């Protein structure tokens, strides 16, 4: 049974950088996108971007273009999201979500990582 | 303000048929596949419908999706108490450099 295992909760100061990991556990798969989506408490889903682990290509949402870097390490089947210059409104649960269906759907989700930005 | 528009709430009684709408534009729903996600309280979202009307394995056939032009619908037949959740539509949007857009979500209450 395949799962996405995310790193633990983080507490950061404004202006800091956070890096979250997402590891595929169990049966692995090839040819997928890894998306990152965030959800502030009580709010809806917001797409951050995606990385294609096969070649490292990335697409970022315009709102995060200048502050986020998505990477993937195929040897460890782990993807990473680095978000810089954190602000209080970056406080949210960050999900990684794999899309294996050769479209932009996200059919396997991680449990989420809570990032709290507070002074 | 979400790019895709959903009603904030919907409700129904057990056994009923409920429809949740999602509207967008030609750069997203009108030209690309539409997806639906279900988020139960306190859990991660789950893919419910992909490519407008396809169900991943394990999703009951009580859930169905359709699309026409720049609008889409999720229909839940034979409503059950465990269907009480937040439902999100999503699509690829071709504007700017391309990105995924979500609806604001619809909270479904089973009365």
Image (cartoon, rainbow, N blue to C red):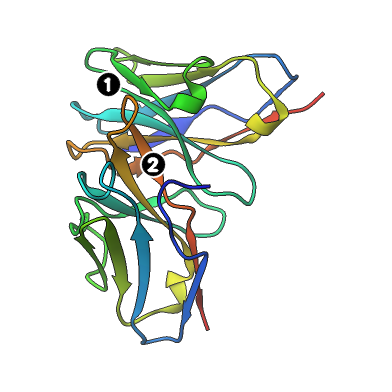
Q: Residue at x 27, y 41 (%)?
A: B27
Point out residue A35 in the picture as x, y percentages from the top left corner: 37, 31
| Front-most of residues A10 and A58 | A58
Q: Is residue B93 visible?
A: yes
Point out residue A50 in the picture as x, y percentages from the top left corner: 35, 26
Quadrant of res B12: bottom left
Question: Which disc, if any, is residue A52?
Answer: 1
| Front-most of residues A61 and A17 | A61
Residue bearing mark 2: B101
Kind of element beneath mark 1: loop
- Seen from this angle, which residue lies furthest right? A119
Q: Chain of mark 2?
A: B
Q: Is residue A1 visible?
A: no
Point out residue B89 in the picture as x, y percentages from the top left corner: 37, 54
Q: Residue at x 43, y 46 (%)?
A: B3
Point out residue A97 in the picture as x, y percentages from the top left corner: 38, 36
Asked if B12 appears above or below A43 in the picture, the reply is below
């Amino acid at each position: 049974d395949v799962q996405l295992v995310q790193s633990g909760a983080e507490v950061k100061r404004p202006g800091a950088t956070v890096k979250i990991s997402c590891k595929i556990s169990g049966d692995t798969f090839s040819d997928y996108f890894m998306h990152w989506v965030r959800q502030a408490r009580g709010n809806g889903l917001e797409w951050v971007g995606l990385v294609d682990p096969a070649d490292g290509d990335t697409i970022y949402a315009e709102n995060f273009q200048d502050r986020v870097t998505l990477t993937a390490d195929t040897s460890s089947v782990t993807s990473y999201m680095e978000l810089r210059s954190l602000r209080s409104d970056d406080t949210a649960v960050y999900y990684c979500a794999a899309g294996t269906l050769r479209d932009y759907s996200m059919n396997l989700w991680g449990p989420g990582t809570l990032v709290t930005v507070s002074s | 303000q979400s790019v895709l528009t959903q009603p904030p709430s919907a409700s129904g009684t057990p056994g009923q048929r409920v429809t949740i709408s999602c509207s967008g534009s030609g750069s997203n729903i009108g030209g690309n596949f539409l997806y639906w996600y279900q988020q139960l309280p306190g859990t991660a979202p789950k893919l419910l419908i992909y490519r407008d009307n396809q169900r991943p394995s394990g999703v009951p056939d009580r859930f169905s999706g359709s699309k026409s032009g720049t609008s889409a619908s999720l229909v839940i037949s034979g409503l059950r108490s465990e269907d009480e959740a937040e439902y999100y539509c999503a699509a690829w949007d071709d504007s700017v450099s391309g990105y995924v857009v979500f609806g604001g979500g619809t909270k479904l209450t089973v009365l």
